[in-house]
Amino acid sequence: MRSQGLAAVATGFRSFARYFQGVLGADAYTKYVEHHRVTGHGTPPLSEREFWRDRTDRQETNPQGRCC
C-alpha cells in the first residue's frame, strides 16, 4: 500500500512539473522540433541555441502581451 501511495505522489509531481514547464515555456523547443518534423520542412530545424536566440530576438522587437 505504501509504495502505491508513493508512486501516485511521484506521478502527480511529474505531471505538475510538465504543466509548470509548459506555463513557463520551457518546452517550446521540443514543441518547435515536433512541429518542424510533422510539417515536413525541407531544411533541418534550428539548434536549441539558435531557437532560443531567435525567440528572444523576436520578443524584444515585438514586446506584445508582456508585463515587463
Image: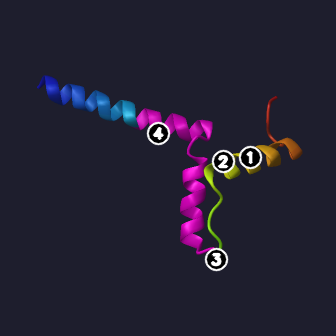
**Disc 2/disc 3 C-alpha distance (Å):** 20 Å
Bounds of the magenta span? 15-42
Q: Earlier in the sequence, mark 3 or mark 4?
A: 4
Mark 4 nearby-residue class (10 Å; few <14, some 14–19, many ≥20): few
Q: Earlier in the sequence, mark 4 or mark 1?
A: 4
Above or below: residue 65 compared with residue 43: above
In which image quadrant can residue 40 be found? bottom right
- Where in the figure is residue 3, as x and y percent of width and height? 15, 27
Tags 1 and 2 touching, CB below 8 Å: yes
Which residue is pictured at 56% across the width and 45% down the height? Answer: 27
What amino acid is found at the position of numbered circle 2 in the picture?
Arg
Locate residue 14 relative to residue 54 in the image: left or right: left
Name the residue that disc number 1 marks: 53
* The N terminus: image quadrant: top left
The numbered mark at residue 18 is 4
Tags 2 and 3 touching, CB below 8 Å: no
**Disc 3/disc 1 C-alpha distance (Å):** 22 Å
What amino acid is found at the position of numbered circle 3 in the picture?
Gly
Count up the numbered dots. 4
Foreground tag (4 vs 1): 1
Name the residue that disc number 3 marks: 42
Name the residue that disc number 2 marks: 49
- Secondary structure of the residue carrying tag 1 is helix
Q: Earlier in the sequence, mark 3 or mark 1?
A: 3
Q: Earlier in the sequence, mark 4 or mark 2?
A: 4
Which residue is pictured at 65% across the width and 59% down the height? Answer: 46
